[in-house]
Image (cartoon, rainbow, N blue to C red):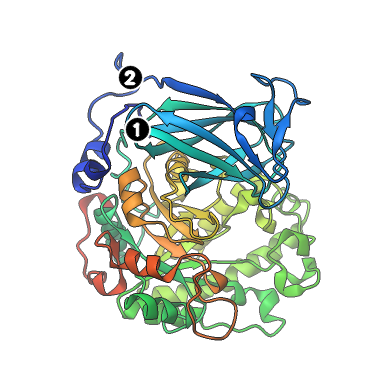
Amino acid sequence: MKRRKCFANLSYMGALLGAAMLTACGSGEGRTAGDESAFVPETVAVYEAEDGSFSGNAGVGSSRGGYSGSGYATGLEADGDSISITVNSPEEGFYDLVFFCASSDHKENFVTVDGLGYNNLVSESSTFTECPIERVYLKEGAHEVIVSKSWGYMDIDRLELRTCDADMGGIFRPVVKPVNPNASDNVRRLMSYLADIYGKQTLSGQFCDTGWHGKEFTVVNKVTGKNPAVLGLDFIEYSPSRVANGSTSRATDFAIDFWKNGGIVNFCWHWNAPEKYLKDPWYSGFYTQYTTINLKKIMNGEDEEGYELLMEDIDAIAQQLLILQENDVPVIWRPLHEASGGWFWWGASGPEAYKQLYILLYDKLTNEYGLNNLIWLWNGQSAAWYPGDQYVDIIGWDIYPGEHEYGSQIGTFLKSVECSENETKMVVLSENGCVPDPELMLRDGAMWGYWCTWGGEFVAGNTAVYVYSDQYTESEALAKFYENDIVITLDELPDLKTYPIREDAK
């Protein structure tokens, strides 16, 4: 399913009508691809970036060819460097901000509109190419658009303001039937519940290595008076190379306990590479730079021993998943995450080797071990790394927008939806730094199925003290978000052990 173009002028209060907006944006009725009436975006205005204002090292350049106007904005090199452009929207509504950018390789930088953060501006071409920030909600009048240094080293030729999609199509009617035909009833119940609330409400989530009585959950509860509905855990310490060095974990026990107390369990796996491939320090063996592993050679048969070692590692994690299955715990399972970034070894050999490993992992856990308690959450961070609709139940994206940035991340939401080849998959914010404002999520149509804030510094600092940290999401904002009717907390979850299974989940 790809989104259809259909511009609408929605007022802020009208957008907050919730169900009415989502029905209008998600009805799937009206224009379809190929209709004579299909919407064609219009360019409202063009702004030359070199005419903007600059901070720090930012300024005007002309050595890169292919620019329009008298030059381009450049010099995003250090923290504090920024480019500011004032745009004028002729009426209230949604717009695309289409930047024309160039860079030596993949680069990302921050974008704010009137102080509100949007998803990062991404450039991957050495020539000036369209780099859109999609579906930005603007009131009539002037707005300040700022691009500030994140990765830096990006040239910006111009910014075009275009009318854009306000029709959300069938986004909020996702495929509910699990990809595993033998999925357990509890998996089907959980998928049914997630689909029932999708587009209307969002689940609160929090990673906490020590379970729902641990530091992150404790400080969130102190601030909000509530507990998150989703517990994020990691199988990292069950990796054989870490066990060999003395690591232990109770993550499986914590998951069982949380499920028994009514919560939803989400697992990732920072897969520490087999000992043969580790560099110092051994405990950083999930990072590419601390391993000598070559996944491409393993998957194409050049490294047969490496293949067997990976299978042994998978076997170790399968044993933990089997324990969870024996306890009737459905697991939102997010393996091989953030692959396209390349910083983890499973993404360092490119998308083809990664997809081979993902599919092999699915086949081994599903068909060899008979693990029917898994909801497969793919989190590759780029459509080029998508393994196929038949291996994915939910699409997740990890977003760390900076500090005190509460935007809905609508552009990334839409990009996530479009990763699916032929179907509509549910989309979640599988990791986040700042918590998005649920009112902005609803206004923009970026209704992530859940968010799951990473632990440590993003909630409680990196010390043993159980004190909430305001560095990323301020305590006042967090309390406000958790109190919002759009947000579901642990105490508001239904009994997922008896929840009715939808017909389309069977």
Mark 2 highlights which residue? 38
The amino acid type found where label 2 is placed reads Ala
Report whether residue 174 is seen: no
Q: Quadrant of the N terminus?
A: top left
Whole-percent x, y for residue 254 in the image: 44, 81
Q: Quadrant of the C terminus?
A: bottom left
150 sits left or right of 429 in the view: right
Whole-percent x, y for residue 115 in the image: 47, 48
Whole-percent x, y for residue 289 in the image: 77, 60
Viewer-proximal residue among 393 and 366: 393
134 sits left or right of 351 in the view: left
Within 10 Å of the Cα at label 2, are there few (<14), some (14-19), or many (20+) other Cα atoms? some
* Number of residue marks: 2
The amino acid type found where label 1 is placed reads Glu
Q: Residue at x 38, y 19 (%)?
A: 40
Q: What is the quadrant of residue 121 in the picture?
A: top right
57 sits left or right of 398 in the view: right
Q: Residue at x 32, y 27 (%)?
A: 7
Check contact, mark 1 vs mark 2: CB within 8 A.
no
Marks 1 and 2 sit apart, C-alpha to C-alpha, by 25 Å
Report whether residue 53 is seen: yes
User: In what element is the residue under mark 2?
Assistant: loop
- Residue 273 lies, with reference to residue 380, above or below; the image says below
Q: Residue 140 shows which numbered tag? A: 1
Whole-percent x, y for residue 145 in the image: 51, 39
In front: mark 1 or mark 2? 1
Q: Residue at x 69, y 51 (%)?
A: 299
Viewer-proximal residue among 77 and 186: 77
Which residue is situated farthest in the top direction here?
36
User: In what element is the residue under mark 1?
Assistant: loop
The numbered mark, 1 or 2, whose residue comes first in the sequence reads 2
